[in-house]
Image: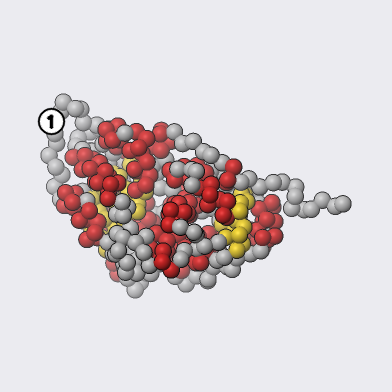
Amino acid sequence: MPTSPIAEAAPQSLCAREPFVPADRLVAEMVPPPRFDSVRFDTYVPDPRQPSQTEAVSVLSSFAAGLGGAHASGAGRRKWFAKKPAAPAGPRGVYLDGGYGVGKTHLLASLWHATPAESSLKAFGTFVELTNLVGALGFQQTVRTLSGHRLLCIDEFELDDPGDTVLVSTLLGKLVEAGVALAATSNTLPGKLGEGRFAAADFLREIQGLSAHFRPLRIDGEDYRHRGLPEAPAPYSDEQVAKAAYTTAGASLDDFPALLEHLAKVHPSRYGALTDDVRAVCLTDVQPIPDQSTALRLVVLADRLYDREVPVLASGQPFDKLFSDEMLNGGYRKKYFRAISRLTALARDAKALVEQ
């Protein structure tokens, strides 16, 4: 019986992975994700119909230039017995205020790259990654670890968890006292439905005493991932997905419902490690998400795959059918629309896996 050309190598399975991530890796990885390694202000393409995008590039470029020189609280880390430095004059932070897909993360990463300081003196991470860091190191050690930095960038500041918001706001207060400059983007609060619109008032209210340290910078625009691009390809057959998994080096192959069950056993802080060295994710039998907890875990995985530019090839239902109308009209709607947008972009990238 002839050997099937697709049976020469077995793809890996995400469901078979149970990664362990040590605390020092959490600190070392607080840099822009691989997708944003090469982004700069001059690679951001403003929509000519949205002058606020061009203005944002100018303001952020000036902000980055102003972070050169000595640390705001002096050279290096402040000793515990040293005199507390005076608070820096004027806002030491910027808040990028805009809907999903207008390039906020591109601009935030560009700010990180443009800030004239060594990489070890700049930190970049999502809100979830920052709370995971506090959980791994403890609050005081996190303060000591980050207080010598010039800049801390926080992407997707979570305004929907009051406890974590208070925790991170307290942390940022300590870092501001140490002279660390801040930059952030955020999602919307539950009940603030709109159409992915702006959350500056919510953000500034939730961080309370820190609001004076942030300058809101509004960025209007449409989701760039769909600006002038073709629609996402329709889902493929199970056979096409399996063949692509077997013929693509470094690909994974999993049944979608089984993967959702596995994600419940892995802490979201490890989803990045879950995809280490994976070149493509192949999924069969994609179905609508059964509940909100599962949906939020998938959002985190979608973010990590998008950060790493891992194409996603799938059979079953299209990605815009993942979330129910109730979910898309609820308090986490912005997260779900972001996940749909990002998975759609990755599905476009995966088209070449079938055509090769």
Scheme by which the image is coloured: secondary structure
Residue in the foreground of this view, choosing between 97 and 237: 237
Q: Residue furthest bottom?
A: 49
Residue in the foreground of this view, choosing between 129 and 163: 163
Q: Is residue 175 above or below residue 354?
A: above
Residue 81 located left or right of residue 199: left
Q: Is residue 290 above or below residue 150?
A: below
Residue at 35% x, 71% y is 48
For label 1, the SS is loop
The percent coordinates of residue 301 (x first, y second) are 48, 51
- Residue type, numbered disc 1: Lys
The percent coordinates of residue 294 (x first, y second) are 46, 54
Q: What residue is pinned by disc 1?
A: 83
Residue 229 located left or right of residue 156: right
> Is residue 214 in view?
no
The percent coordinates of residue 144 (x first, y second) are 27, 32
